[in-house]
Amino acid sequence: MNDLLGGSIKIAGKMVSRLGFGTMRLTGPGTWGDPDDRGRALSVLRQAVHTHGITHIDTADAYGPHTVEHLIRDALYPYPEELLIATMVGMARPAPSVWAPHGHPVYLRSCVEASLRRLGVERLELCYLHRIDPEVALADQLGTLKALQDEGKIGQSACRRSPLRTSAGPERRWRSPRCRTSSTWPTGTIRPSNCAAT
């Protein structure tokens, strides 16, 4: 079965299926609210993991918001030991189809704490910063995730995507939407997958 999923890859210290399952579409229109058929959404999650052998799920507290994390817990808890749930924080959702990066340290911490409760876990094995907030110093955003990692609430942290410009300095572009360890990031913070700043 794993060959059909592209083999395996090591992410956040765990060997998982190279083909993961993105959960953004398990909500209502505009990535907002509950899906029209909640039972079907639960079934899709269970089939992905239990039938097709997918062991890497990608989600975010902003999906719904909060909807998909509830669905994941209802469908899959208690989680299989081999399952990696990667979730993203730091994106406010004021309305359907509206996304606003929000990287204030207090907000990021509250997002992580709430995701822990919704998913029913003591630690987020992999937690992404959904987007870098250009209005907040990058060091403060990454430092907050690193502090939560030091507290044992996050296993590994990463940056999902970056804007073209941050308040901390000149324009920076990433060659990949995901990015890996650099000496300019707090120790222990990863940028998963091959990317380099230009």
Image: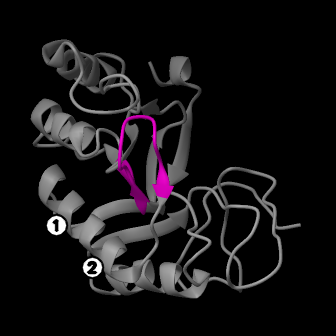
Image quadrant in which you'd find residue 112: bottom left
Callout 1 amino acid: Glu
Pick whichever, 131 or 50, lies toward us: 131
Q: Residues within 10 Å of mark 2 (few under 14, many from 20)?
A: some
Q: Position of residue 66 (x, y in %)?
A: 24, 46
- Point 28% across, 44% down: residue: 65
Count of numbered circles on the image: 2
Q: What is the magenta range?
A: 85-100
Task: Write down the residue under mark 2.
Answer: 152
Residue 149: x, y in percent?
Answer: 36, 79
Is residue 93 part of the magenta span, yes or no?
A: yes
Residue found at x 83% / y 79%: 170
Q: Secondary structure at mark 1?
A: loop
Q: Please say whether residue 80 is one of the residues in the magenta stretch.
A: no
| Closest to the observer, 77 or 102 | 102
Q: Earlier in the sequence, mark 2 or mark 1?
A: 1
Residue hosting label 1: 122
Q: Considering the image in quadrants, where does the C terminus appear?
A: bottom right
Q: Are marks 2 and 1 in contact (CB under 8 Å)?
A: yes
SS category of the residue bearing label 2: loop
Q: CA distance from mark 2 to mark 1?
A: 8 Å
Whether residue 164 is visible to the viewer of this picture, yes or no, is yes
Amino acid type for the residue under numbered disc 2: Gly
Residue 81, above or below 111: above
Q: Is residue 186 visible?
A: no
Quadrant housing residue 40: top left
